[in-house]
Amino acid sequence: MMRKFNYNEIVVLNPLQTRYQMMSSRVFIPLYAAANDGIYRMNRAKRVGGFAATLGIVIGVIVLAFIAIFGIFLVSLALPTSFSYPVDWIPTLIGVGLIAGSIFGIIKLVKIGKRFGKITNDLEGELIVSWDQVKTITVMNVRQENVANRPSLVVNTVAPTYKEIGDWHVLTTDGNDITIPNVDDPYNKLNYVKNRFNLNFS
């Protein structure tokens, strides 16, 4: 069963650390978040799809804006002579058509973009384990990862910024072991989650 969230209701456990991870296999790892009643697997695909659609709409608006500018340029060239040479009405009308069509298209895309923008901001997840089923959470596989997020990969490599990343192993009361991979600052985040949601497992 899916549950919708506001940002302030959850603690994201394993977010992407850099923009470059969006182009790596890390995007295929499920996104997990802690809430007041348990740990959820978030619906990342829906948000990514909404983001991709929004990006496509932005590109479409930019293209239409350039077409409108070209139409204005065409009208400005042809209109002064169209009164003397009727044949020049053709490029004038084409320019007007480009302007009108582009404006109409931009308005439609903006309306569609608002709808997809809401999808991008939606947070929903599926409960994978409730807190009353958790026996213990153990932090394992702790390592330092370079999370430098500057525009230059070379600078990121030369001047790295390291962050502690680890995995949570969630042992449930019925003996199952659930792994939450790539939790950033795993020890402090575990303590924070315990304190925030008033949890007392070991």
Image (tube, rainbow, N blue to C red):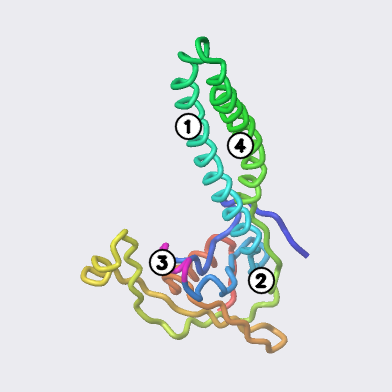
SS for dot 3: helix
Q: Pick out the residue farthest to the bottom.
A: 175
SS for dot 4: helix
Image quadrant containing the C terminus: bottom right
- Discs 4/3, front: 4
**Is there a contact, CB below 8 Å, between mark 1 and mark 2?**
no
Name the disc covering residue 131, or none.
2
| Amino acid carrying mark 2 in the image | Trp
Between the residue at mark 3 and the residue at mark 2, the CA separation in whole angstroms equals 33 Å
Between the residue at mark 2 and the residue at mark 4, the CA separation in whole angstroms equals 42 Å
Between the residue at mark 1 and the residue at mark 2, the CA separation in whole angstroms equals 60 Å
Query: At which x and y percent is residue 139?
Result: 48, 81
Query: At which x and y percent is residue 180?
Result: 56, 77
Q: Which residues are magenta?
A: 18-23
Name the disc covering residue 110, or none.
4
- Residue 40 in which image quadrant: bottom right
154 sits to left or right of 201: left
Q: Residue at x 51, y 35 (%)?
A: 67
State the residue position of label 3: 20
Between the residue at mark 1 and the residue at mark 4, the CA separation in whole angstroms equals 21 Å
SS for dot 2: helix
State the residue position of label 1: 70
Q: Earlier in the sequence, mark 4 or mark 3?
A: 3
Q: Earlier in the sequence, mark 1 or mark 2?
A: 1
Name the disc covering residue 138, or none.
none
Q: Say if 196 sits above or below 29 in the image.
A: above
